[in-house]
Amino acid sequence: MGDVEDLVTIGQIVKPFGLRGDAKVRSLSDVPGRFEGLHDVTLVSPTGRQLGTVVTRVRGTGVSYVVGFEAFSNPEEVTAFRGGWVMISRNESPALPPGHYFESDLIGLRVVCEDGTLVGVLEDIWNTGGQHIFAVRGERGEVLLPAAKEMVISVNIAGHTMTVRNLEGLLSEEAEGAGCDVTS
């Protein structure tokens, strides 16, 4: 089990499933067959507790799977990790083409406008079926931004920053405000 920085999040534990300690897991990966071939994983609870374990069984398709973990033998053990993450070693992840990022690398980035004005922190990425949406939380609440090339100017993983364009209707200048303050 390595540092969380050396891991890639591929799923989220939704809830216990059945009596044998299986878990319903929401896939956060778009790699075909990602769950069917799993073996060694690290589970990270919402409290930050890490647990290295082996996947014993997987069934389901699409965005939801029922996964058996060697570490769990009953629903109560799964409950302690409800809302937590299923992670694998970054070495086991395929190389991404330029301009593509793992969701786990984007979550937590500071989102700023071209002029440097802080929009907030990227807290979640929603897959709406057609396009991904960035959920950014800042001083003025939650802002939803399309995860589109037209919106994102740059991503600096090392600098923990994503720079976005001020598109009309999403972010706008206020009469006396600076830059791209979020509309209320």
Image (cartoon, rainbow, N blue to C red):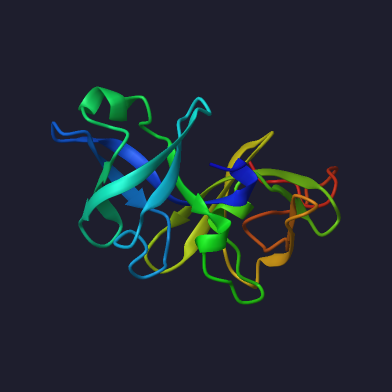
Viewer-proximal residue among 1 and 79: 1
20 sits left or right of 1 in the view: left
Can residue 122 be seen here? The reply is: no
Viewer-proximal residue among 87 and 158: 87
Can residue 67 be seen here? The reply is: yes
Identity of the residue drawn at 73% across and 63% down: 165
Viewer-proximal residue among 59 and 141: 59
Query: In this rendering, is residue 88 above or below 44?
Result: below
Query: In this rendering, is residue 98 above or below 41?
Result: below
Quarter of the picture containing the C terminus is top right
Identity of the residue drawn at 50% across and 27% down: 49
Q: Could you tell me how many numbered marks the image carries?
A: 0
The spot of residue 108 in percent (x, y) is 64, 44
Query: In this rendering, is residue 121 above or below 72?
Result: below
| Quadrant of residue 168 within the rendered picture | bottom right
Identity of the residue drawn at 29% across and 39% down: 70
Query: In this rendering, is residue 148 above or below 77?
Result: below
17 sits left or right of 8 in the view: left
The spot of residue 134 in percent (x, y) is 56, 54
110 sits left or right of 78 in the view: right
Identity of the residue drawn at 42% across and 55% down: 28
The spot of residue 96 in percent (x, y) is 58, 72
The furthest residue to the left: 19
The spot of residue 13 in percent (x, y) is 35, 40
